[in-house]
Image (cartoon, rainbow, N blue to C red):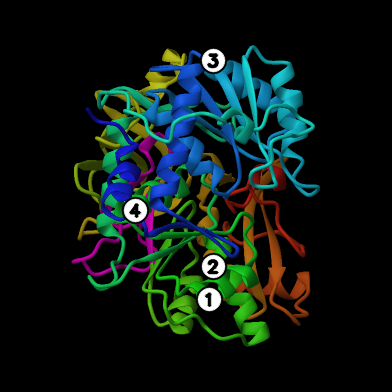
Amino acid sequence: MLNLATVLEDSAREAPDQAALVLGETRYPYSLVNAVACQVANLLVSRGIGKGDKVALACPNVPYFPFVYYGILKAGATVVPLNVLFQPREITYHLDDSDAKALFCFEGTPQLPLGERGKAGFAEAATEHFIVLPATPGALESEYGETLWAALDGMSPEFSTVQTSGDDTAVILYTSGTTGQPKGAELTHQNMLLNAIISDEIFPRSEASERDTYLVTLPLFHSFGQTTLLNGGFRRRATLVLLPRFDPAAALELMRRENVTIFAGVPTMYWAMLTLLHTDGGEVPTSVRGAISGGSAAPVELLKDFQATFGLPINEGYGLSETSPVASFNQPGRPGKAGSIGWPVWGVEMKLIDDKWNTVEGEGPGEIAIRGHNVMKGYYKRPEATDETMRDGWFRTGDLATRDGDGYYFIVDRAKDLIIRGGFNVYPREIEDGLTTHPEVSLAAVVGIPHPSHGEEIKAYIIRTPGASVTEDELLAWCKETFAAYKYPRSIEFRDTLPMTATGKILKRELR
């Protein structure tokens, strides 16, 4: 048997009293998390849901997420995590597209009316069961319907996990759908379990006599947080400190209060924490031993700033929902390289290809293709889309990269973000990295906009550093001196904020 739920079951057996989760002042031991997950599994079986069935979960970073996530897996069913920012129409689409038989939905808050949206989306879908995860722990009633605690009444806290094979689908993770409708990547128990083990092994580890503490503010419905923090952290028997909504002040306070040893985030999270530390002069947390970044390429200036401030490097990795997600990492035992996504992890191959799948030798650039135990089975119910992106076990990522003589990979940009100006290729990340070297530029996003003669023109959206007064004309003049003639932005727009996904990635399609 190979079931992803073993990462919880093994830790509950070996360290039952160890704190698995912390939310606010409440601590949840591994034994309790496992017991509630067993109750959820018994509930599902009692409702006729079992091996191979799909069950959706719409929940922020609160204890309900692992309770239900592992309960679904124990029952042999497939978890379909939903973005908590979805509107009713989007919830309906994901429920129907995944053939979900049930939806576990967080009740929500005034700031996040998830219960209201979930109920409305469920009402238009073919899904049979709607179970509310109440905002008040232990609540037996909700205006949106049956609560989890009422449904679990009388359910045993023991359950014999359903036998699943490595090739059975454990999770369906939906892509962001930047083009066309979102597609569900089918990830197997083997995909997810091996990726969790690899994440555990490559993340820095505390002394043998100590327990690691992870700060979990990456959304657990997303592949990055789900694999590296939830599954990888539970496999390590770490304590996971939950922060449902990222806030730099709250994150830094939790690091100090809970002696957090591992932080994983996207570049904008690091940027926000560093900006706060530099402006407010707060105490830098000293317990952090590992800082992990993924989701998008971190600007080199940000990497330097973090190293100088925290006294340790940010280790960058790379992956996608379709690769479970970790594919490469700046790994222990090898010197890290600033701006690099490192080497392929154990059991994974990477190469560069052109648009016709031909291998690109040397430094490139080329599109990254990945093959290994981490690559999905395919897109759920979409054989044509699967065939477009997979060939002979290789998955083409849509990400452009170069490779140096030591075998380290460096992301150039997303293929879809590439700007072609007057026949010249312009990579936004290069311009963004350059812009952030300006002392009055805090964050930059560069996009291509339509142009009648050049095809595309280059535009930069800028967040200035606190107190900065640089004007558009001054910054344009600086850009003209800094970049080649075909590369520098022709227009600049200053913003107080930039649009971002729930995971902290800048939404360039909205800027465009």
**Mark 2 / mark 4, whichever is N-terminal:** 4
Secondary structure beneath disc 2? helix
Distance from Cα at disc 3 to Cα at disc 2: 38 Å
Q: Position of residue 314 (x, y in %)?
A: 40, 69
Q: Which residue was labeled with disc 1?
A: 257
Tell me residue 423's x, y (percent): 54, 43
- Per the image, the residue denoted by label 4 is 16
Task: Give the CA distance from mark 1 to mark 3.
Answer: 43 Å
Quarter of the rendering occupied by the N terminus: top left
Q: Position of residue 73 (x, y in %)?
A: 40, 30
Looking at the figure, which quarter contains the C terminus? Answer: top right
Classify mark 1: residues with Cα within 10 Å, few (<14), some (14-19) or many (20+): few
Q: Given the image, on which type of amino acid does mark 4 rest?
A: Pro
Q: Are marks 2 and 4 in contact (CB under 8 Å)?
A: no
The percent position of residue 324, horizontal first and vertical second, equals 37, 39
Which callout, 3 or 4, points at the residue further toward the start of the chain?
Answer: 4
Magenta segment range? 315-343
Q: Is residue 512 visible?
A: no
Q: Residue furthest front?
A: 154
> Which sits earlier in the primary sequence, circle 1 or circle 4?
4
Alpha carbons under labels 1 and 2: distance apart: 19 Å
Q: Nearer the viewer, residue 127 or 140?
A: 140
Left or right, residue 471 beside residue 328: right
Helix, strand or loop status at disc 4: loop
**Residue that label 2 marks:** 270
The residue that disc 3 covers is 99
